[in-house]
Each structure stands twice: as structure tokens, then as C-alpha cells.
Amino acid sequence: MSLINYSSREINCKIVYYGPGLCGKTTNLQHIYSRVPQETRGKMISLATEMDRTLFFDFLPLELGQIRGFRTRFHLYTVPGQVYYNASRKLILKGVDGIVFVADSQIDRFDANVESLMNMHDNLSEHGLATEKVPLVMQYNKRDLPRVVSVADLEKELNPSQAPYFEAVALRGAGVFDTLKVACKLVLKTLG
Amino acid sequence: MVKGNWALFEEDFYSISLILQTLMRSAGSRSVMLIDKTGQLINSIGEPPGFDVTSFSSLAAADFAANAQLAEMVGEKDFATLVHQGTNESLYLSLIANRVILVVLFDKKTSLGLVRLKARRASDELIVVLNRLFNKLQYRNEEATVPTLGAEFLAEADSEIDSLFRE
């Protein structure tokens, strides 16, 4: 839920990276953290297990600076992808302004993508949010791997609403910023 | 509400600041924060904390959210207050109007009892201000526009996003 503070002249927006386990949500945030100027980013928080699997969420605040007198910030969150952490996923979605759905392009992860997407719809509706009302960007990750589903098939199955999509190799940073930029712009458009 | 978001206007911000300042002084606490339930910092009063308040806010909201789920599991509607007691520093967190979290950071110079008492009083006052604000937002939604965030804002934001978020 974006918060506009007219007194301290601040705008805060929340973008959540959603997707199945090991699809690259945390990798997206790590890449963003490593590449944005130091004054743009805050501290990155990762609540992860000892095996570096996200337990609760990752959090990265980004600041655009002053725009027409408003300090504009984006708070990026990831959800834990593993199926049994649904209670945590639901909590992170609370107050979401925009979603990046990171899909794993590998053939054997196709069903996991579908399941995660359905789970996202369910969790949004439990918050009283209709998926079509929330700005959404699709990211088809791991395009460099050998056995991947074609983009056309991913689009057909995962993106019926024709949200903007990007191909990505998050580990190398490809497509990460394209995805982020469009997500941020879509979110701000809902405020304008 | 303003297009599904929530906005804080100058007069409400000052009322809130005043309540928080009074709470901080009367409870003998080090600092007081007000955080939106989704993890956004609304206001912070007192000693500038030696930590990142943005991250702190997101963790405090997550803490509350997780505890609310635990409450539900044991058959409670919610745990309206949480206390984290450390050797030197302690935290008192309380949910107000089901929308915002009041956080009081205090040390051994004061007691939990006093913090709790003063925080309850402040919560009652904050509820009045917040309800007034929510009613106002409802009304402004009918006007359907937020005058300061127009096309120029979006154009400038877009170009800033393009220049900052790139390889």
C-alpha cells in the first residue's frame, strides 16, 4: 500500500517478487543491490535459512531521490518460494503495490510456475485484491539453461492478461533492471 | 482512500508528531516510531537511532504480522502488543486502529510498566487522529485525484528510474 506523506513529502511503494522456489527472486534483489549507486540503496535484509533459502523475506529499499519535491522510495520484497511457507507469502503480499512474477524457464519447473501463480492469485484475493488490479510484470528467468520452455508457451500459460514480460538470466543480471524499471513505472502510474 | 493508497496530510502529521513527542517524554523512552502495518515508516521521534529505520520498520511489521498469525493459531484475535526485552535496550510494539504500529524504544532508565501506561494513553489519542485521517481520505477519494502527483511527476519519475536503474 503506497504511503504518500504530504508533510514530510515522501512516497513509499511496495513491490513484491513472487515465484516458485529457486526461481531467482533473491538473485534479482542481490543483483540490484550490487549495481545501484550506494546512495540509492538502503540496507538489504535477508531472513534466510543456513542453506541460503529465503525463510521469511528479503528486503531492499531503493530511493529515487527528490521528484517534484517528493522523496520517492521503492521497497522491494521477495517471498519464500517453497510451497510450505505460504503463511509467510501471504503476509508479505499485504499492502503490495506491484508484483514481479519470476518464472523459472526450465521445462521441469513449469508446473511449479503454474502452481505458484495460482497461489499468488489465491493469496491476493484473500487480501481482497484482484490480480488484474495489481500492476504485474512477468520475468522469464534462466533463459541461458539448455532445457527451457519457449517464451511463447510461457506467455500462453502464465500470462493470459498480457502483462509486460522480460527474458532474464538473473545470475548474470540480464533482464533484471528492465523488469524493475517497468514494475516501478507501472506502480507510479497507479498513483498519478 | 486516495486510489487505494493512503496519504498523510500536514495537519495530521503534526498532530501525530505531537502525540509521539509527549509519549516519548512522559515514558522516559529514547525514541518512538509509528509504522504502517505494511512496513513503511510514518514518523520517528527522539534520538536518531543508530540503525537503519527503513529496515527496522519492515522487520517490525513482519514481526507483528507473524505474531498475528501465531495469535490466530492459538485462538486469539491478535496479539495487540508485543514486548522484546533485552539486557540494555527494549522494544514495546502496539497495534493501533488495526492499521499502524506504535514502537517505543526504551532502556533501563525507565520501566516497562510506565511505557505501557503512557503508550496506551497515546494510542487512544492516535486513534482519534487516524480515524479523522481515514475519513478524510475516504472523502478525497471521491475527488479521485491527488493534485500534486500529475503528469509532470510521472515524467520526471520515469526519467529518474531510467537513469538510476541500469547496468
Image (cartoon, rainbow, N blue to C red):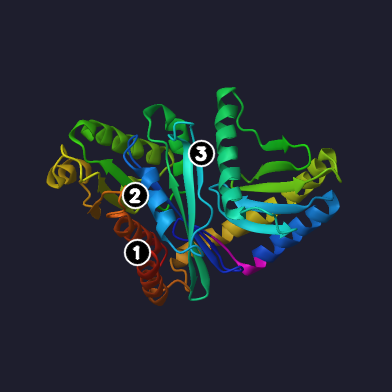
Q: Residue at x 68, y 42 (%)?
A: B94
Residues at circles 1 and 3 in contact by the CB criterion of under 8 Å: no
Labels 2 and 1 within one chain: no
The x and y percentages for residue B56 are: 61, 49
Task: Please provide the residue range marked out in magenta.
Answer: B7-11
What amino acid is found at the position of numbered circle 3 in the picture? Answer: Leu
The x and y percentages for residue B124 are: 74, 48
Q: Which residue is mark 2?
A: A100
Q: Which residue is mark 3?
A: A47
Residue A89 placement: quadrant: top left
Q: Crowding at label 3, few (<14), some or many (≥20) Cα neighbours within 10 Å?
A: some
Q: Which mark is residue A184?
A: none
What amino acid is found at the position of numbered circle 1 in the picture? Answer: Arg
As rendered, which of B67 and A19 lies closer to the eye? A19
Where is the C terminus of chain A found, in terms of image quarters? bottom left
Q: Residue at x 13, y 46 (%)?
A: A152
Inspect the magenta stretch and tell me whether residue B9 lies in it.
yes
Quick one: label 3 or label 2, which is nearer the N terminus? 3
What amino acid is found at the position of numbered circle 2 in the picture? Answer: Val
The x and y percentages for residue A126 are: 42, 37
Q: Which mark is residue B166?
A: 1
Residue B1 in view in this figure: no
Q: Crowding at label 1, few (<14), some or many (≥20) Cα neighbours within 10 Å?
A: some
Q: Nearer the viewer, mark 3 or mark 2?
A: 3
Left/right placement of residue B149 relative to residue B84 reads left
